[in-house]
């Protein structure tokens, strides 16, 4: 009796570690594919020359000096939040609460500006704002960490729910502080006195934010790579049982790391409120807390690689928005293009981690 063993046409298996240049070649190919798909979709919708589409994408970020500064400002804030969530992710603590932690920091900053503006020297007000934003963000990150450490709650759901609570808190205080009453918004805080506004350095409004993000990037790299705390985060991320075996207090590491993540998110919220927008809204974070998750993962938790991934995402988002503006399309079309780009970039990680093996030759017969 003959038994035929049929093997599938292909199967998926996990790759070994790829050289860094091979991994980035795959990502580069995904980016090119994303550009081609965006150009194709835009050409089909608008009838425009694909070359004009690419020029429009570039113009969206570098069409003028102001656009370039806005690009780098957006990169700085996204990078700051990405760096904030990275220690938690490296520890395998799924902190999806970057949005809420940023809002908490922004709310604390706005409160200091509104309640203390004009009552304290400018330098002292800024010091208090920095401390308040760090404390608020740390508390917002620390609450789910304590519950995780003590009662092993689901950190993904917990941090996500904290986002909604922070949003509603901001909405409440907007009504309390709204100017004029019934406007539904705070407006520019301390517009006449500029009390609490972060200083402008080098004549550029966004340079301070960019500088702070660069300092945080270097500091986070040193913290994760060369300190005892960074080592403990790595060990806990690999195996909590191993960490306990070598004497690491896992619960303490969880709480400490989330306090750090929340504090850095709080700083990002302060930069937005006091350094860029000078107001507070429920949408001031613009979804950066969620985008930061992708930035951190794409960069494999490497702070310096996050600079590139942050640039890539912000550049393509602004390019998609410029296409929608120039060709008279709705913002929904820009969101479609952004979705195509992110789909290709995220999809490239599959081919970096896994490989597809095709069947060779005929099926074996016994």
Image (cartoon, helix red, strand yellow):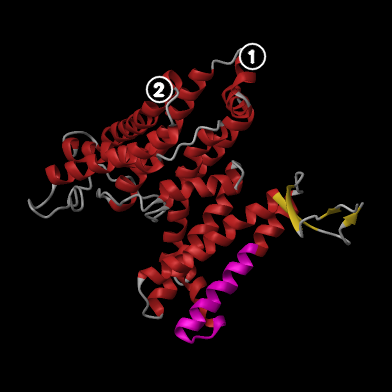
Q: Quadrant of residue 157?
A: top left
Please rate how many residues cluster around mark 1, counting C-alpha atoms within 10 Å: few if below 14, some from 14 to 19, many from 20: few
Front residue of 311 and 11: 11
Is the residue 172 above or below the residue 243 in the image? below
Q: Which residue is mark 1?
A: 245
Mark 1 and mark 2 in contact? Answer it, CB < 8 Å: no
Is the residue 304 above or below the residue 126 in the image? below
Label 1 secondary element:
helix
Front residue of 294 and 57: 294
- Magenta stretch, residue numbers: 30-51
Residue at (48% x, 59% y) in the render: 314
Is the residue 152 above or below the residue 35 in the image? above
Q: Position of residue 136 (x, y in %)?
A: 32, 31
- Asked whether, in this view, residue 351 is left or right of residue 358, the answer is left
Q: Main secondary structure of the magenta part?
A: helix
- Can residue 57 be seen here? The reply is yes
- Asked whether, in this view, residue 80 is left or right of residue 360, the answer is left
Question: Which badge, 1 or 2, comes first in the chain's sequence?
Answer: 2
Residue at (57% x, 23% y) in the render: 229
Q: Which residue is mark 2?
A: 146
């Amino acid at each position: 009796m003959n038994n035929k063993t049929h093997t599938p046409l292909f199967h998926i298996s996990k790759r070994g570690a790829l050289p860094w240049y091979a991994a980035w070649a795959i990502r580069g190919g995904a980016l090119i594919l994303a550009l081609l798909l965006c150009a194709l979709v835009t050409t089909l919708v608008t009838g425009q020359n694909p070359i004009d589409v690419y020029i429009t994408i570039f113009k969206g970020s570098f069409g003028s000096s102001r656009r370039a500064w806005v690009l780098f400002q957006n990169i700085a804030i996204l990078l700051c939040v990405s760096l904030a969530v990275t220690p938690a992710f490296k520890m395998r603590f799924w902190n999806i609460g970057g949005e809420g932690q940023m809002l908490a920091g922004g709310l604390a900053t706005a409160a200091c500006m509104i309640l203390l503006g004009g009552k304290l020297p400018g330098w002292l007000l800024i010091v208090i704002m920095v401390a308040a934003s760090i404390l608020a963000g740390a508390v917002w990150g620390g609450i789910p960490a304590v519950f995780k450490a003590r009662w092993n709650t689901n950190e993904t759901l917990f941090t996500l729910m904290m986002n909604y609570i922070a949003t509603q808190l901001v909405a409440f205080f907007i009504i309390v502080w709204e100017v004029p009453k019934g406007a539904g918004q705070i407006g520019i805080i301390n517009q006449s006195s500029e009390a609490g506004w972060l200083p402008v350095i080098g004549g550029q409004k966004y340079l301070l934010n960019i500088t702070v993000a660069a300092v945080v990037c270097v500091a986070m790299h040193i913290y994760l790579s060369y300190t005892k705390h960074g080592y403990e985060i790595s060990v806990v991320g690999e195996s909590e049982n191993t960490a306990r075996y070598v004497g690491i207090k896992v619960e303490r590491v969880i709480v400490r790391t989330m306090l750090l993540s929340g504090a850095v998110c709080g700083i990002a919220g302060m930069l937005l409120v006091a350094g860029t927008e000078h107001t507070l809204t429920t949408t001031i974070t613009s979804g950066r807390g969620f985008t930061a998750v992708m930035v951190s993962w794409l960069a494999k938790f490497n702070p310096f690689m996050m600079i590139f991934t942050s640039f890539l995402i912000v550049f393509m988002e602004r390019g998609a928005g410029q296409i929608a503006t120039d060709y008279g399309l709705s913002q929904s079309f820009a969101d479609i293009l952004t979705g195509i780009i992110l789909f290709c970039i995220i999809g490239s990680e599959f081919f970096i981690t896994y490989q597809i093996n095709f069947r060779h030759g005929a099926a074996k017969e016994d």
